[in-house]
Image (spheres, rainbow, N blue to C red):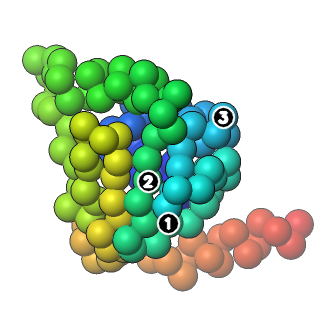
Amino acid sequence: MRLDNILFRLGMASTIPGARQLVNHRHVLVNGRIIDIPSYRCKPRDIITAREKSRALIQNSFQNLFDLPSRKQKRKRVPYHLTLNRGQYKGLVKQIINTKWVGLKIKELLVVEYYSRQTKT
């Protein structure tokens, strides 16, 4: 699971491009180390935190996503494979999500076949 996607799912960023920007600008720590690669692969038991100086950015995102829901939009829930501690600006990856849990019927072999043809030309 990519770091930018996890930040988005935790609610630390309101969009995935916003999460990418947080990571690129070195606002995020994974297991106490600064990570500036949005495609960084997170593993179970990884702890994702916001740097001290960056907490105001993430606080705004928390307020927009959790505290002020519009009438059309429900409050955002943190997925069951992640844990969020809003007070400490900390998230935990509990487990890797299984493709069967997503509920999409995708023929992965067709996707691989499509992209393998694209690289040959």
Mark 1 near mark 2, Cβ–Cβ under 8 Å? yes
Above or below, 88 against 54 in this view is: below
Determine which residue is flagged by label 1.
42
The 10 Å Cα crowd at callout 2, few under 14, some 14 to 19, many 20 or more, is many
Callout 1: helix, strand or loop?
Answer: loop
Q: Position of residue 32 (x, y in %)?
A: 52, 56
Residue occupying the point 26% across, 65% down = 81
The 10 Å Cα crowd at callout 3, few under 14, some 14 to 19, many 20 or more, is few
Q: Is residue 72 left or right of residue 88?
A: left
Residue occupying the point 60% across, 60% down = 40
Above or below, 71 against 101 in this view is: above
Determine which residue is flagged by label 3.
25
Amino acid type of disc 3?
Answer: His
Is residue 47 visible in the rendered structure shown here? yes
* Front of the two marks 1 and 2: 2
Is residue 19 visible in the rendered structure shown here? no
Q: Earlier in the sequence, mark 1 or mark 2?
A: 1
Callout 3: helix, strand or loop?
Answer: loop
Q: Position of residue 59 (x, y in %)?
A: 35, 25
Gap between marks 2 and 3 measured at Cα? 15 Å
The residue nearer to you, when weighing 89 against 114, is: 89
Q: Is residue 78 left or right of residue 61?
A: left
Determine which residue is flagged by label 2.
48
The 10 Å Cα crowd at callout 1, few under 14, some 14 to 19, many 20 or more, is some
Q: Quadrant of the C terminus?
A: bottom right
Amino acid type of disc 2?
Answer: Ile
